[in-house]
Amino acid sequence: MFACLHGTGNLAAVAFDFSPLVEQTAPDTVTCDVAGLDRLFGAAQELAAALARRAVETGVQAAIALAANPDAAICAARGFSGVSLIPQGDEAKFLGSLPVALLGPSAELQETLDRWGIRRFQDLAALPPLGIAERLGAEGLRLRELARGEAERKLTPLEAPPRYEDEIELEYPVELLEPLEFLLARLLNGLTTRLATRGLATNELRLNLHLETRAVHERTLRLPAPSLDGKSFLKLLRLDLAAHPPAAPIDRIRLGVNPVKPQAAQGGFFVPAAPEPVKLELTLARIQAIVGEGRAGCPELLDTHRPDAFRLQQPGTDLTVPRRGLCAAWTARSVPALPQGDRHHCPRGAKAAPWDSGVSPRLIFRMYRPPRLARVTLASGQPSYLAAEGIRGRILKRAGPWRTSGDWWTTDPWSRDEWDIALSDGALYRIYCEIRGWFVEGSYD
Amino acid sequence: MGAAVLQKQFESLLGGHLGWREKPAAEVVPSGIPEVDLATGGLPRGCLTEIFGAPSSGRASLLVSILAEATARQEFCALVDAEDSFDPLSAAAAGVDLPRLLWIRCGHNAEHALRAADLLLQGGGFGVVALDLGDTPVRAARRISLTSWFRLRRAVEHTPTVLIAVARQSNAKTCASLMLELSRERARWSGGTLDSARLLGGMRVAVARRKPGLAISAAFESGCERNGAATIGSGWHRGRLGTDTTVHAAQKTRLGTVVSVPV
């Protein structure tokens, strides 16, 4: 059984809702194989009615015809409006009243048929095949078959537009993460296979969990680089759901992926290996499950002079790309000549080049987060004794005060006086005084 | 026939000592401080290097120098910061390429830091993984079992990663392949009077290699560029109060902007 839709609108979408075998016969005609749908819809009339309903729902205006062969269905859909159902064996009788021009004969053949007075299907169908073969050739015979509704052929299938979204409706709500993982693995497996067959990867996972309470728990995971690693996706989803569990049992799961071209990058011969982006993302997710969300990433300084102004951002995808133009082997300094008898050795090819002795390391500051509230005793306007949590002692040496201020044009200005001090406990600290009192900001190390 | 006899026969045939039982020497990388490299021979890959010393003994300076050197080699590094004490500003000024540094802020939890370091080592691909327990109280650091250090050592073995642990005292013991003890020799102050200087100029740090082999000492100077610059137009001002104008402040580097202004 074949169905044909002839009209305007997204005919293919309607056809794909009923059958995977769809042919785009013409821009305004779509034919599909609906054999076997009687188990779902019952009689052919029911199927035709369902097709018509679906067409109305999707805004398609089309004539629908069902027949035992595709060409009879096409002729009926083009010739009759509304829904036509051609009983098997009655094609010639049903199509008999249609004009021959509907079969699309060549101009020369159309003229011949006009001269003979053949204007309808039934006229052409009544002609003897031998005579048609002698006078009109193969095209004539083909037109006769079509007019009799006897032409048999296979459909040229149209590839269905790929959908990268799957869903599972559950009979019983899922409450635990473990059974949910099995379902997610099933969905992910199907989606990654679909992507792989088309040579694609994904950089985004969209998970919609429909809860018993009618609410929808939505999670979106963005990957730093396109990947097809289903196992990693599952681990990422599990970690994300463990960190953000849904508020109620789940009765429907929908998982979608964003299809993109896979990343094709070749690492440089001299560029050191960097963590794989997806593996790094997974490691970061695991670490954030331990230390807390937003507490791992690459630091980025903010464009302000406010103390301790930074933010954490996700590591980039181009970790293996040299940032300074030269390859690592050329830019890296080598280890200087080692003392005799040392058990370590220089890497192959690394020359014992003299060091640039002009470069000295920077004294690094260690922050106390949050700054420690301190009690400071002043002598002659200068701090002379400090007591704070875990720090206590006489100030032996000091440099300051250094006044810093900023953001006075905003609602959150800051202003403070800083001292660098050497305490009797042997350490070097930075302390500051502001409106709220004295604080130890950190130590030099 | 004994193994020793067989070995002797092979060695006599091949004309020399085979040395097949010796462990291949680890590849080393520079720390960024030539004096330290001369004393230690570099930092071994696939091994645990322990840096320890009292507060303000130059541990962070050495650690950041190692990170700066590694990021300059285009390696991706990780810093597991147990006490949340890392200062990105001074690290950037010291030459650390921040986009190549993964910073894990463990919020005063050494156990979390150990687990994070273990995960990073298992993940692989890092040039340097640094576990900073420098501000962790000695008692808390000592509570870390030797098993945990063995686990870290085992995880970093046969990888090209340099694992560094920074603490106040040595904790890893036999698990560390290289142990460096740091101590501050003196702080360098400039200008002003005996007890009230103008600038903290830096400090001189003594480094002693405790392991492997005989103790070798070295010293390096770490400089401090005390900010005294003023960036006009950004609403930021920094200057010493009540001073004359003969002292020139050091350079201030923020997001690629270098401003040097006398104060």
Image: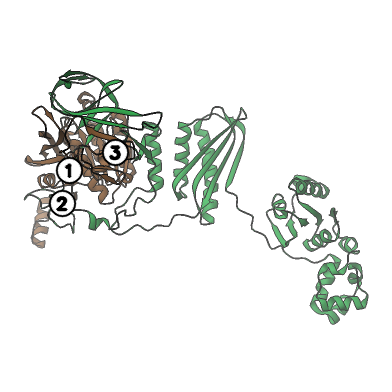
Residue hosting label 2: A335
Residue hosting label 1: A361
Q: State the green chain.
A: A
> Disc 3 or disc 2, which is closer to the eye?
3
Numbered tag placed on residue B74 in the rendering: none
Expressed as whole percent of the image width and height from the top left, the position of residue B242 reads: 19, 29
Element marked by disc 1: loop
Q: What's under tag 3, amino acid-wise?
A: Pro
The quarter of the picture where the C terminus of chain B appears is top left
Q: State the brown chain.
A: B
Q: Nearer the viewer, residue B225 or B167?
A: B225
Identify the subunit bearing mark 1: A
Q: CA distance from mark 2 to mark 1?
A: 16 Å
Q: Is residue B49 visible?
A: no
Q: Is residue A360 visible?
A: yes
Indicate the quadrant where residue B124 lies: top left
* Of callouts 2 and 1, the N-terminal one: 2
Expressed as whole percent of the image width and height from the top left, the position of residue A415 reads: 30, 28
Badge 1 and badge 3 in a common chain:
no
- What residue is rendered at 26% in x and 33% in y? B148
Residue hosting label 3: B88
Expressed as whole percent of the image width and height from the top left, the position of residue A431 reads: 22, 26
